[in-house]
Amino acid sequence: MVTFLRGWLLTLLLLLAPMTHAEGVDIVQAHLESTDEGVKLSATFAFDLNRGLEDAITHGLPLYFTTEIELTRPRWYWFDEKAISESQTIRLSYNVLTRQYHAAILGRLQQSFSSLDDALSLIRRPSRWLVAENSALKSGAVYSVAVRMRLDVAQLAKPFQVNAINNADWRLSSDWKNFLYKAE
C-alpha cells in the first residue's frame, strides 16, 4: 500500500510540475519616454531559465536575448507606415575559470556578475534604451508600438541551433505587447 501511494504521489507531482514552471517571457511593463537624446524604451521582463538553459550557460554556451520594438503610424489611404524597427541583443555567458557571469549589450556595455540571478537582472530590467531620435517621429502623431523579447537561437553556433529548434527548453519568448505612443 505504501509503495502504491508513493508511486501515485510521484505521478501526481510529475503531472503538476509543468504547470508550476512558467513557460516563456512575460512583459511586466513597457513604455516609451521622450528625452533630450530621443525616445527611450523602458521595459521590465519576467522569466526564469529552465534547467536545460542553465546547464548550457554553465557549460560555456552563451545565450542571446533579443528585444525588438516596432513603431508604426496608421494611414487611412495606404498601408501603415513603419517608422521605427529596432532590436537590441544582450549576450549572457559564463567564464568557468573566474566563475563569473558576463552580460553584454552588444556593441556597448559589459558587466560581470557573481551569480546567474544577478546577471539575469540586467536582461529582465535593461537600462533605458534609445530607440529613436526625436526627429525620427512626427510631433503630435500617434504611433502603435509593439515590443517583444526572446531567446535568439539564430545567434548560436550551427550545431546548437539544430538542437534548439527541436527542443522545447530553448523556446523562450514573449508575445508582442502593443500600446500607443504620442510623439512630442
Image (cartoon, rainbow, N blue to C red):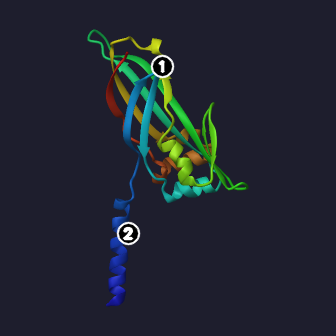
Q: Nearer the viewer, residue 154 or 111?
A: 111
Tell me how many marks there are.
Answer: 2
Residue in the picture at 46% in, 31% down: 68
Report the disc number at residue 123: none
Q: Tag 2's secondary structure?
A: helix
The residue furthest front is 36
Image coordinates of residue 133 in percent, x first then y, are: 49, 17
Amino acid type indicated by mark 1: Gly
Amino acid under disc 2: Leu
Residue 14's label in the rendered image is 2
Q: Residue at x 34, y 89 (%)?
A: 2
What residue did someone put label 1 on? Answer: 38
State the image quarter where residue 9 is shown: bottom left
Percent from the top left, x then y, of residue 57?
A: 60, 53
Neighbourhood count class around disc 2 (C-alpha, 10 Å): few under 14, some 14–19, many 20 upward: few
User: Is 60 on the left or on the right of 141, as rendered?
Assistant: right
Quadrant containing the C terminus is top left
Q: Which numbered disc, 1 or 2, marks the residue closer to the eye?
A: 1
